[in-house]
Image (cartoon, rainbow, N blue to C red):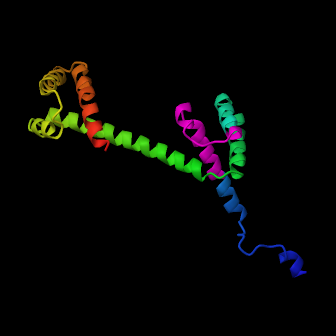
Amino acid sequence: MTEFLHGDWDEDEELKSKTQVKREMEALQKLGEELISLPPTLRAKIPLDEELQDAIILADKLSKKREALRRHIQFIGRLMRSRDIEPIEQALAVIRNTNQAATRKFHLVETWRDRLLAEPDSLTEFVADYPEVDVQQLRQLLRQAKKEQEKEQPPKAYRELFQLLKPLVTKIDAG
């Protein structure tokens, strides 16, 4: 009798509890939701087979129908169970890291802009770090931005200053 129960059993195969199976299904559904939330340009960078691509495109069309979308996300999770999701997860990790790096660069530009406006000595440091900057234009924008802040005017020069700094800071720190 025990031979019948265990005879075809592969000893390397793991027994999974219902809870574990449910967790894995929910993780695949979350992965599916993340794929759905991506814009089509980023989605194109992820290695998806045709059936999965079609399911994600259909999910876009179901976005206004909550219950239908919920069931469709479950369907996408079921589709992903039979696929190797490692390449999908790797592609998503690259996209996440790219977004995080862009956010860090954006914050660095903001930090420089705010330092240049608050600390007069930081201009020398900035010019030393970024020698290709047009110093005359930088000083002019700094003066205008300070006047705008004093007079509580719309921050036009403040934004222009950001646009001047952005290509300089992101270019050098990209490497």
Q: Is residue 170 left or right of residue 21?
A: left
Q: Quadrant of residue 6?
A: bottom right
> Is residue 11 inside the magenta stretch?
no
Q: In the rendered view, would you say 114 is above or below 23?
A: above
- Where residue 156 appears, as percent x and y from the top left, is 25, 20
Residue 16 pos. (x, y %):
71, 66
Q: Position of residue 41 (x, y in %)?
A: 53, 32
Quick one: quadrant of the C terminus? top left
Magenta segment includes 29: yes
Residue at horizontal 28%, vertical 31%?
167
The residue positioned 28% from the left and 42% from the top of the image is 173
Along the horizontal axis of the image, is 47 left or right of 51? left
Give the left or right position of residue 93, taking residue 100 as reference: right
Secondary structure predominantly adopted by residues drawn in magenta: helix
- Percent coordinates x, y for residue 132 in the rendering: 18, 32
Residue at image point 68% right, 48% down: 80
Count the numbered circles shown.
Answer: 0
At x 12%, y 24%, the residue is 136
Most foreground residue, 68 or 83: 83
Q: What is the magenta range? A: 26-52
Quarter holding the N terminus is bottom right
